[in-house]
Image: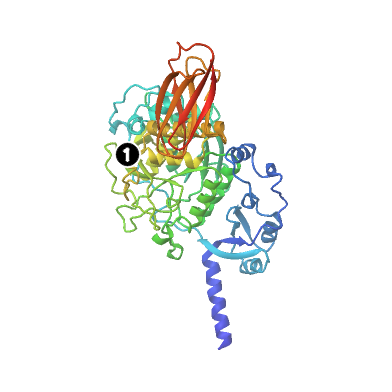
Amino acid sequence: MRLSIILLCMLVSSLAYAQHSRYIIEFRHKEATTYTLNNPSTFLSVSCIERRNRFNIAIDSSDLPIPHAYLDSIRLSGNVEIINTSKWLNQVLIKTNDAAALEKIRTFPFVKNDFAIAQKAIKSKESGRLNIGRPIKKENAIAPTVSATSLNYGYAGPQITLHEGEFLHNKGFQGAGIKIAVFDAGFYKYQNITAFDSLRINNRILDTWDFVQQNGSVNEDDAHGMWCLSILAANIPGTFVGSAPEASYYLYRTEDVATEFPIEEQNWAAAAEQADSLGVDIITSSLGYNQFDDSVFNHTYSDMNGQTTMITRASTYAINKGIIITNSAGNEGARKWKYIVAPADGIDVLTVGAINILKKVAAFSSYGPSSDGRVKPDVTSVGWNTFLISSTGEVGRGNGTSFSNPNIAGLTACLWQAFPTLSNKEIINAVRQSSDHYTNPDDRIGYGIPNMHKAYTILEGLQRSKDLKRILKNDRLKIFPNPISNQFNIFYKSDLTGKVNFQLIDLSGRLIRTESFELMKDSYQLFLIDNLSGLSAGEYILRYNDGVNSGNIKLLK
C-alpha cells in the first residue's frame, strides 16, 4: 500500500514536470548580494538615481539585484535555463524539465518557494493584448476637421483635442525629455514605417528588448505595439501626429501572442525593472491578464484588488520608484468576465477606458470598480474608432482600450514635461481631477474625460503652493520684493478658511491702502498689491489680520 502511494506520487510528479517547463523560484532574502546601497551607481543608471533624489525616494533592498551566488547555484543544479529575474519580487524565472534539478533547487536554504508558471508552447485562442479588430485602410477613414494648432495633427486631431491636448502642445510641451517605455506584443515594421522617421533620425528609440525570445529585436513581432506606439509617437504633419511626438521611447516585448500564461506577468515585471534602472519616466502598457490557457493559473475578480497578481505588485513597485504607469482597462465589458484586468487594478495605475469621439462608452470597455471598491477605470479616451498607423504605414482605425491608453499616456508625458519637479502621483491626481466626471465617477468611465488645460492649471497652482512653502519655510508671511516698487507680492501661509485684511500705513499712522483676500484652509497663497506708482519713497508698515493671526511687516520704497 505504501509503495503504491509512493509510485502514484512519483507518477503525478512526473506528469507535472512533463506538463510545465517554466517555473518561478522565490527567494527568502538577498543576504549574499555583492552590491551595496551605499554605491547604487553599480546597479542603477545616473538618470534613475537622479529621479530618486529629485523626489526623495529612498534606494532600498528591493533595488538590489538578485545575488549572483543564488543564480549560479540554480544554473548549476542541472538542466536549467534562467530566463529573467525580478529583484522587486525577489524571484527568478527558469525553464527546465529536469525533475531532479527542481528538487535540488528546493533544498537551497535561500529558496523560499517555487511554482509552475507556464506550459510548453501551445496555440492560444486569445492573447493578453487588448485590441479588438484590425486597423482599416486610410481610404475608409473620414477626414477630421480640427481647429488650427501649432501641430498639424491630421487624422489624430479629434482624439487629441477632445482632451484639449493642443493646449500643452501649443505651449511647447510635446514630450521632449520624457522617457516612455511601451510594453506590448511586438512592434512590427516600426523600423521601416515612415511615421516613425523622426524617432529614428533623432535617435529617440533608446532601448529595445524582447523578454519573450531574449534578444534585442522587436521589429518582426506582432503589430499591436506598433499601433499603440503610433498613437504616441507618429509624426507625419498634416496626416497623423501622435500625442507625444517629441518624447523618447523604450520598446519592450513582454507578451507572447501564441500562448497565454502568467509567465507574461513575470516578463512585464522584468521589463519594468529594466525601465526603472534606465531612468524611464512613464510605462504605458496595453496589456492585461485574467484567464489563461490552463485554468489552474486563472485569476478571479477578487484578485483585482491592487495587491495580489504578480503584474500588479510589480506595477506598485514601479510607481513607488517614481514612475507613472498608464494601462488599458481591458476589453471585457461585453464578455462574461466584465471587469478590469491586471494590472489595471493597481492603486496608482492610471487605468484608461474607451469611448468614441462622441463620448459614448464602448460596449467592450471593461467595468470597474476594483474588487476592493476603488474607482476604476480612472479615466477614458478614444478607443472606439481610434485613428492610428496601420501595418502598411497608412492611417487606419482600431477598437480597444489598447488604443485609448497610449493617447492618454502621451498627453500625460507632455503634462509632466511642463512640471518636471512634481511627482508621478501629483501628475496622475491632476489628470484625474481634470476629468469631466471627477465629482461623480462611475464604473464605466471612472472620473471621465481628462482636460489637459485644466490639469495644467491644477498643477500650476500646486507648483506655486510648493514654491511658496519653500519660500516661507516657518514664516507666515513674506514680501517680495522689499524694497517695493510700484507693486509687491505677499506670500501667505493660511491655516483657515475666511479672509485676511491688509493695511498699508506710513510712519505717521496714516492709512494709505486696504486690501482683503479670500483664504483657503491649509494652503500657501500669493497675493498682489499693485498700482503704487504715486507712493513716495520711505518706510511703511503692512499690517495683517486674518481673525486669528495678526502682525506687522516693515516695507521700504
The colour scheme of the drawn protein is rainbow
- Could you say where residue 85 lies in the image, as x and y percent from the top left? 60, 53
Number of numbered callouts drawn: 1
- Could you say where residue 531 lies in the image, as x and y percent from the top left? 43, 15
Q: Can residue 311 be seen at all in this image of the molecule?
A: yes
Q: Which residue is situated farthest in the front direction here?
A: 508
SS at badge 1? loop
Judged left or right of residue 363, residue 127 is: right
In which quadrant will I find the N terminus? bottom right
Establish if 302 lies above or below 194: below
Residue type, label 1: Asp
Residue placed at 31% from the left, 25% from the top?
146
Q: Which residue is mark 1?
A: 436
Q: Residues within 10 Å of mark 1 (few under 14, many from 20)?
A: some
Write down the quadrant of residue 81 in the picture: bottom right
Viewer-side residue, 461 vs 4 = 461
Viewer-side residue, 361 vs 553 = 553
Q: Can residue 220 be seen at all in this image of the molecule?
A: no
